[in-house]
Amino acid sequence: MPGHEGNVLTRATDFPYKVSVDDPEVLNIDAATAARDVDWYLELSWSSGDRQGTTRIDDHGRPFRTAGMRGDKKYWYNANGTNAWIPYP
């Protein structure tokens, strides 16, 4: 689905992605929860010619953690702009 980088709407690309050394693809994952603390990781299924596999994407061997923020101040990390935590509207 389309996303946002700050106030700029970004387009969505349909799966499956086709990538190469000269044309890599970056996936930005936006995880959110309203009121719970969640541990999670991604599993990326891939294929290349006759090879295939699954790669686990995590936080250096540990799951990522997303914490609910009901009633708290919210921030997001703007990695494509200021490289800083900024208030979330």
Image: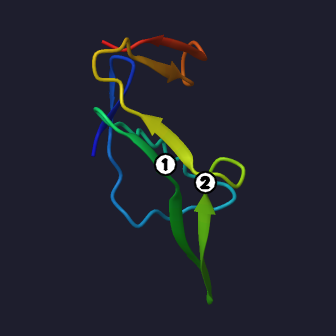
| Residue pointed to by mark 1 | 39
| Residue pointed to by mark 2 | 23
Q: Could you classify mark 1 by the number of other residues whose Cα lies within 10 Å: few (under 14), some (14-19), or many (20 or more)?
A: few
From the viewer's perspective, is residue 21 above or below residue 82?
Answer: below
Q: Residue at x 33, y 58 (%)?
A: 14
Give how far apart the Cα atoms at labels 1 and 2 are.
32 Å
**Left or right of 32 on screen, residue 22:** right
Which amino acid, by three-letter code, is at mark 2?
A: Asp
Q: Residue at x 35, y 14 (%)?
A: 72
Q: How is this picture coloured?
A: rainbow
Instruction: Between residue 14 and residue 39, name the one nearer to us.
Output: 39
Which amino acid, by three-letter code, is at mark 1?
A: Asp
Residue 2: percent from the left, percent from the top?
29, 40
Q: Are marks 1 and 2 in contact (CB under 8 Å)?
A: no
Residue mark closest to the camera, 1 vs 2: 1
Residue 62: percent from the left, percent from the top?
65, 52
**Left or right of 83 on screen, residue 43:** left
Question: From the image, which quarter does the C terminus lie in?
Answer: top left
Q: Residue at x 36, y 14 (%)?
A: 88
- Residue 72 shows which numbered tag? none
Residue 4: percent from the left, percent from the top?
35, 28
Label 2 secondary element: loop
Residue 29: percent from the left, percent from the top?
45, 43
Label 1 secondary element: strand
From the viewer's perspective, is residue 80 above or below residue 63?
Answer: above
The count of marks equals 2
**Left or right of 72 on screen, residue 84:** right
Point out the tag, 1 or 2, that comes first from the N-terminus. 2
Instruction: Between residue 64 and residue 20, name the one nearer to us.
Output: 64
Instruction: Between residue 79 and residue 67, name the one nearer to us.
Output: 67
